[in-house]
Amino acid sequence: MFVQIGIIVVLIAAGVLIWYKGSRFIRDLIAGELESNADEVTAPDERREPAGPVGPDGLVLLFADRFVDSAPRDRQVSPRLRCYAPLTEEELDPQHLAQQILYATFVSLYEQGSIDFRVVERMATLMPPYPQKTWELQLSQIGPMAESPISDALAVAFGLLRKRDRSGDDDEPRQWVSLDSVIEQALKTMRQEMSFWQRSGVYGDIRQYVESALIAQGYLIEPAEPTWLDRVRTQRPGVHQEGALSLEGDAKELARQLGSFRAEHGGNLLPQVSREAEALSNVNSAILCPPDDAPDLPLDEVLRISIYETLMALRQLEPSGDAGV
């Protein structure tokens, strides 16, 4: 009996000793982290000078206050999805930012003669956001694609889809692939270069992919990540003000190019509202399911509708929480 009591006392004493040593180790570890944090915070900010050209995707992000709708006031946005204009700190609509990044890239590639579009008939998918849509937009690569983060991902996606869908039909001079499949494959390509904790859904992943390229070029400044906890938090990069503003002429030229494309290839068929997301969520059924004798749909509306539909469909497949996906 006494032997059993002695064993129990020894075990309890050993447990207390292990707990004491462990708690001291954790305190020392935290203290070391805090001291390290203080050293990193007080260390001089080493910024690389911005270098290299910036494509339409990067210009849309850097000057997002000019190209993107403000954050919607009528609905809550998850903290992990929130995004802000680098130069003005204005909160933006994360969905519209992703749409505009893709839209500007596709328009630029089209205007440069890198890709071509066509609209083909299809069966209605009966899936949101456009269950009755009876056409799809396809594209074909007809020339070299200019380098930029999104353009590079699209080029990889396009090449993979062409290899996978090769039919051996020599009568078809070009290979056409649907826009939604290209965007979906490009997103997979982007996510291969991102860690689990960086992912925040299709809108955030497109944005962060472009941000990473701008950080590498020096136009954005990577946020400090001194601790493991900071690595799982959403932190916004800073902006190199002088470097970003040196691209203002390029941003104005991009805005002119997008306006010219819309004027030449648009038909003013969407609702005239201040927010594009609202216009694209209320598309007239005559556009989604046009009669056989209807004239050709304008390319601008077709492109915007197709990008919106694709991103909405991808978002609906993702978890609604804040966890990485």
Image (cartoon, grey):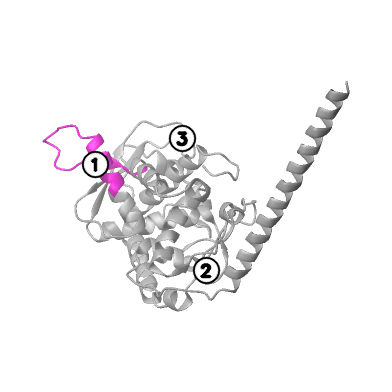
In this view, the residue in front, 320 or 268, is 320
Q: Earlier in the sequence, mark 1 or mark 2?
A: 1
The kind of residue on which mark 2 rests is Gly
- Alpha carbon separation for disc pair 1 and 2: 40 Å
- Alpha carbon separation for disc pair 1 and 3: 23 Å
Q: Residue at x 47, y 33 (%)?
A: 127
Segment colored magenta: 156-180
Which x, y percent locates residue 278?
53, 52
Which x, y percent locates residue 315?
50, 42
Q: Secondary structure at mark 1?
A: loop
In this view, the residue in front, 302 or 168, is 168
The residue to which callout 1 is attached is 176
Q: Earlier in the sequence, mark 2 or mark 3?
A: 3
Q: Residue furthest left?
A: 170
Query: Within 10 Å of the Cα at label 2, are there few (<14), some (14-19), or many (20+) other Cα atoms?
Result: some
Asked if labels 2 and 1 touch by Cβ distance under 8 angstroms, the answer is no
Residue 279 in sight from this viewpoint: no
Q: In the visual, does 293 lie left or right of 9? A: left
Marks 2, 3: nearer the viewer: 2
Residue 187 in sight from this viewpoint: yes
Q: Residue at x 37, y 36 (%)?
A: 134
